[in-house]
Image: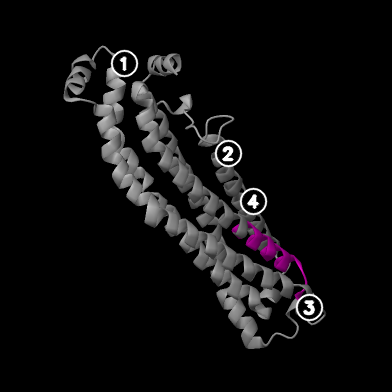
Amino acid sequence: MSASGINPRFKGIQRQDFLDIMKHASEDQNEITVLANAVCTLLNDHESFHLNLVCLITQTSLAAVFRHSAISSILTPIRDIVVEFYVATSAMWNEVYLFLQQGLYILRSEAESSHKNIANAEHHIRAAQVDYLRACQIIESRFEDLLWDSEELLIAQLRGSCGLEILLRLTKRYCPLSSYRLIVMEGIPRRLSMLWDAREILACCNHLGEVMSRIQIRFRSPEWRAYYTGRRDVINLFANTSYYTLVWRDRVENHITYGLYKFNTQVELNIDNRYVGPWDPTEFVWKWYRFWR
């Protein structure tokens, strides 16, 4: 603080500009908070989406062990499109992370060195937009049509012939295989409907892009930078958001590498006993599957 009581960072800022910054200070910080909340929401939405996918793959495969090839031919295209979706969203999140890193550089640097960071932040917003549009194209033009087509096919495979369905219902009280198969079959519409939550992920990504664009407008303002540069509370909020963005990106990449492919393959579906569901308390269905596979 100078002898005049004015922070040196504010020298050269007109009084009205300074008052405008102060007037919108809480709104500016709210934008950054909104950004952090959007990241957390996306983390939760993605985990929910992925959980439903792996449950669908595991439970459907276990329910019809002797129809493995037919079930796999239906589920594999779903898995493959989701992998494409994950690749696009992971790339987008890498750009979001880099945008936040540029924001940290801006908040920590002097005005003379921030112009390059502002340009870099703009570049990362545009790159994230490209990846977002690619993710939209994957979901809207391919994934949703595939879900519509797959529901009837999966139910038909699990139901089998009319005689088999009657047998399953007659034996469900004392045969775990029959009971499990019927429960999974009847839950297919609900499980597939949950995969439509990909739309929710896209909507949240779009909202995030809008918030980033508003923050980028703030970055361009010399008055805004003068007011916020060095602010520890704002820097910490940016840093925490950046960290969770990195966690999200790494989690998506982990799901691609380890969650959707059988170990040491890039083709077979991953059947994971963690997602068998509560309808196999004695692990009879799981052991039966392992015996025949």
- Percent position of residue 93, x then y: 58, 55
Q: Which residue is mark 3?
A: 8
As drawn, the label of residue 176 is 1
Determine the CA span between mark 2 and mark 3. 51 Å
> Dot 4, how many residues are within 10 Å of its Cα: few (below 14), some (14-19), or many (20+)?
some
Question: Closer to the camera: disc 3 or disc 4?
Answer: 4
Q: Amino acid at mark 2?
A: Thr
Q: Which residue is mark 4?
A: 243
As drawn, the label of residue 257 is 2
Q: Earlier in the sequence, mark 2 or mark 1?
A: 1
Quadrant placement of the N terminus: bottom right
Q: Amino acid at mark 4?
A: Tyr
Q: Residue at x 82, y 80 (%)?
A: 3
Q: Residue at x 44, y 13 (%)?
A: 291
Q: Residue at x 30, y 44 (%)?
A: 149
Magenta span covers which residues?
96-111
Q: Amino acid at mark 1?
A: Pro
